[in-house]
Amino acid sequence: MNANNIIWKFSDGLIDYDEAIQFMESRVAQIREGSKKELVWFVEHPPLYTAGTSSKNADLLSPKRFPVYQAGRGGQYTYHGPGQRVVYVMLDLNKRGKDVRKFVANLEQWIIDTLAEFNVIGEKRRGRIGVWVRREGRREDKIAAIGVRVRKWVTFHGICINVEPDLSHYSGIVPCGISQHGVTSLVDLGLPAAMDDLDIALKKTWGTIFE
């Protein structure tokens, strides 16, 4: 799919994390030099943990449970696995205003607008990057994470939204360094959503934020 000079790429199956990093590294360089267009890449990964640049060793509770990767993105530990939509966003901020904070805020709003398509109220929290939903008893659970990297004003890495992952896999880490809150998914919230449903909503809401 190609709209407004952005390529939308959807990969089937579970994509190896090293393969994803190598692809993004190459694409970012190509976008910077002008030989390739901006790209939004939709993937799923096999179960794994990634460590961001602010991660703490103590937050990796089960280091032998799944492969652990040093991601090079911002943030702390997070989990990727089947049933979670990972979207890698490779945009040229030279053309979009050199404002990383605005870019991160736009990613958060994109997630919030997408969740609204399922009648889910996603919320931001000061000091907690990502998107949260309120549960009963004043509980708050994280449904989406954000971790980005910017090289010469070209972005990579991006967001992940839980559709129906195995939430028990999060027990091997302290997700994003936050232990006092839980994690959830669309299915955990009682919504019979599929990955294709989320992708349709993500494409629908993109233009109001980024174009």
Image (cartoon, grey):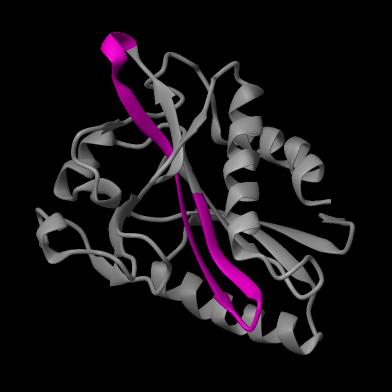
Q: Does the magenta run of residues contain 149?
A: yes
Q: Is residue 170 above or below residue 75?
A: above
What's drawn in magenta, residue-wise? 136-159
In percent of the image, x 54 and y 58: which residue is there? 158
Seen from this angle, which residue lies furthest bottom? Answer: 33
Q: State left or right for residue 100 relative to residue 142.
A: right
In depth, the one of 208 and 1 nearer the eye is 208
Seen from this angle, which residue lies furthest right? Answer: 4
* Count of numbered circles on the image: 0
Q: Does the magenta run of residues contain 181?
A: no
The N terminus - image quarter: bottom right
Residue 196's x, y, as percent? 62, 35
Among the 4 quarters of the image, the one containing residue 50: bottom left
Residue 19's x, y, as percent? 46, 74
Q: State left or right for residue 89 relative to residue 96.
A: left
Q: Is residue 162 above or below residue 137?
A: below
Residue 90's x, y, as percent? 65, 67
Residue 10's x, y, as percent? 65, 54
Among the 4 quarters of the image, the one containing residue 104: bottom right
* Secondary structure that dominates the magenta span: strand
In percent of the image, x 77 and y 36: which residue is there? 204
